[in-house]
Each structure stands twice: as structure tokens, then as C-alpha cells.
Image (cartoon, rainbow, N blue to C red):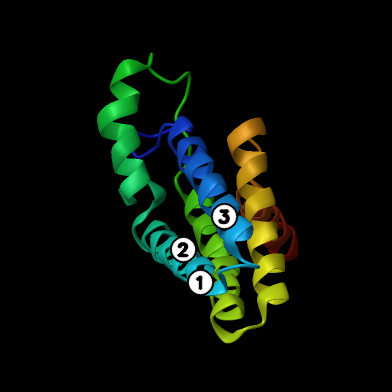
């Protein structure tokens, strides 16, 4: 991997924070859908930063890099930043749908979108399985296969 690679533990840390954010939104969604809309809206902004600038430039990425990574041993290998960046874009779609659902009274829609994002964040945070990253890699394989 080139020097442009990122520590794969950074996106996992970000996923753990995202997991908590969506858990809180889901817990509040029935009693306070407006609060759930604000929470998922803030997460949508964070996803937009991650999709546009890279996950390493999100607030959680900066927190990881400045406070957590210095306390860890160096990673065994670095990761291409493109798949996590794509995963942030996928997360953005779900966060926007959740926000719109909660904000417009379509609470079930918001809950479904937030639950999908929660599951994806859970898989990444707990099992290091980035669903959006896998979608990115599958897209690359399909693109290469159709070009051949």
C-alpha cells in the first residue's frame, strides 16, 4: 500500500461512534422523532465530510489520529482510503433518508433507514466487515469484468 493509505482501525473507530449515534436515534425515534431527525442529520453531515474529504478528515477520524492512534502500535498494513470513502457515501444516503423520515413524520421509514445504517456500523465496528467497502470492491470487480 502507498503512503496515501489509512490505518484501518480509524474507520472501525468511526463505525463504533456511528453505531452509538444510530442507536440513540433509534431509541428516541418513537418518543422524540424530532430529536432523532437532528441526530441523524448531524450524522449525515459527518458522512458527507467523510464521502467528500475522506473518513480520515471527519471529526472522529481526527480524534482517532490525534488521541487514539499514538497510543497503539503501528498497523500491520495500511488500507486504500477509497472503499471507506465510498462507504461514507452509502451511509450518507441512509442517514438522509432517516433524517427525512423522522422530520416528516414517516417515522417507520426513518427507523428502517437508521436500522440499516446501525447494522452496517455494527458489522464494521465489531467484526471489521465494512459493508460499503465490500460494495465498492464488488463494483470494481464487475466493472473490470465488463471491460474485459
Q: Which residue is mark 2?
A: 39
**Dot 2: within a 10 Å radius of its alpha carbon, few (fewer than 14), some, or many (20 or more) residues?**
many
Task: Give percent across and percent down for residue 37.
Answer: 51, 71
In which quadrant is the N terminus drawn? Answer: top left
For residue 61, the mark is: none
For residue 37, the mark is: 1
For residue 22, the mark is: 3
Q: Secondary structure at mark 1?
A: helix
* Residue 124 appears in view: yes
Name the quadrant containing residue 99. bottom right
* Measured Cα–Cα span from mark 3 to mark 2: 8 Å
**Dot 3: within a 10 Å radius of its alpha carbon, few (fewer than 14), some, or many (20 or more) residues?**
many
Name the quadrant containing residue 56. top left
Residue nearer the viewer, 62 or 133: 62
Give the mark nearest the N terminus, 3 or 2.
3
Q: Is residue 58 left or right of residue 117?
A: left
Question: What residue is shown at x 34% (from left), y 34% (from top)?
Answer: 64
Q: Secondary structure at mark 2?
A: helix
* Measured Cα–Cα span from mark 1 to mark 3: 11 Å
| Label pair 3/2, CB-CB below 8 angstroms | no
Task: Give percent across and percent down for residue 83.
Answer: 54, 50
Give the mark nearest the N terminus, 1 or 3.
3
Question: What residue is shown at x 36% (from left), y 61% (from top)?
Answer: 49
* Position of 54 relative to 36 (above/below): above
* Residue 139 appears in view: no
Task: Give percent across and percent down for residue 60.
Answer: 36, 44
| Label pair 1/2, CB-CB below 8 angstroms | yes
Amino acid at each position: 500500500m502507498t503512503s496515501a493509505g489509512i490505518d484501518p482501525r480509524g474507520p472501525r473507530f468511526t463505525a463504533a461512534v456511528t453505531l452509538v449515534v444510530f442507536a440513540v436515534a433509534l431509541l428516541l425515534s418513537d418518543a422524540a422523532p424530532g430529536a432523532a431527525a437532528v441526530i441523524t442529520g448531524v450524522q449525515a453531515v459527518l458522512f458527507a465530510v467523510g464521502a467528500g474529504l475522506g473518513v480520515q478528515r471527519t471529526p472522529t477520524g481526527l480524534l482517532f489520529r490525534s488521541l487514539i492512534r499514538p497510543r497503539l502500535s503501528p498497523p500491520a498494513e495500511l488500507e486504500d482510503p477509497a472503499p471507506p470513502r465510498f462507504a461514507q457515501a452509502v451511509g450518507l444516503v441512509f442517514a438522509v433518508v432517516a433524517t427525512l423520515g423522522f422530520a416528516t413524520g414517516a417515522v417507520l421509514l426513518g427507523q428502517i433507514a437508521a436500522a440499516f445504517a446501525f447494522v452496517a456500523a455494527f458489522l464494521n465496528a465489531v467484526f471489521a466487515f465494512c459493508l460499503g467497502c465490500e460494495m465498492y470492491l464488488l463494483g470494481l470487480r464487475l466493472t473490470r469484468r465488463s471491460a474485459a
